[in-house]
Amino acid sequence: MRPNEITFEYLAGRPHAPKGADWDKAVATWRALPTDDGATFDNEVVLNADDLIPMITYGTNPGMGMAITANVPDPDKLSDVSEKMALDKALKYMDLQPGQKLLGKPVDVVFVGSCTNSRISDLREAARMIKDRKVASSVRMMVVPGSQQVKKQAEAEGLHEIFKAAGAEWREAGCSMCIAMNGDQLQPGQYAVSTSNRNFEGRQGKGGRTFLASPLTAVATAVNGVITDPREMTN
């Protein structure tokens, strides 16, 4: 994908980015990477962002995802035997029923973290949504920056104070509950909305059940105590 001015601005001054004349040379090289005139493609996809619906997982791998407003799929409607067996097994582990909606389902823990969704841009959006709101008393919310650099920047912008004022835990950068490290884990049967990248059985604690979602969905869920479409709060 051709880099643009936003990309250059993001990279400029970062610890491992070229400096001085080397930076100018690198940018000149990057600018020379557009698609060739007359290039053809196998397929072109145009997306209207206004039509996109927040996604959430319902199963035990990241591919088992759906629009947050949709219903849990029915294994009996699948023609592939292996897919049917996998979905049936996943729903039993998650203790979900075919046709069930996830909206309104109570959760125990909300985890905003991992290398996937705790960049500074993610934390800014999460802080913007949770500002002047409170985490539901039934929910434990952890916010774990994706790196030490992100943590320092977030604290310089005062984002950590917003999270703490809302009742969330502001943690050190690291894996944390993404892989159930350092005691940050679900108890058997607990549900979590997590911004991490994996939801395998036991990934976030033995017997724990994980719904993968975006930082905004995580915040909306933390505030309401149940799985919530973040558009209800952003609109």
Image (cartoon, rainbow, N blue to C red):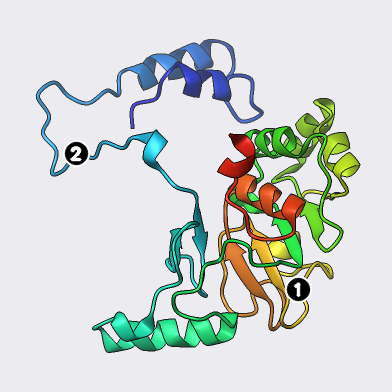
Q: Amino acid at mark 1?
A: Leu
* Vertical arrangement, residue 208 with respect to residue 181, above or below: below
Which quadrant, please, contains the C terminus? top right
Tally of marks: 2
The reply to whether residue 18 is visible in this rendering is no
* Vertical arrangement, residue 135 with respect to residue 12, above or below: below
Looking at the image, residue 29 sits to the left or right of residue 190; the answer is left
Mark 2 Cα shell of 10 Å, populated few (<14), some (14-19), many (≥20): few
Please state the horizontal and vertical placement of residue 61, each as a whole percent of the image.
49, 71
Q: Which residue is mark 1?
A: 186
Q: Which residue is mark 2?
A: 44
Decide which of 202, 3 is in the foreground and name it.
202
> Residue shown at 41%/84% (left/top)?
86
Q: CA distance from mark 1 to mark 2?
A: 42 Å
> Residue shown at 33%/86% (left/top)?
76
The reply to whether residue 116 is visible in this rendering is yes
Please state the horizontal and vertical placement of residue 156, each as a whole percent of the image.
83, 26
Which quadrant, please, contains the N terminus? top left
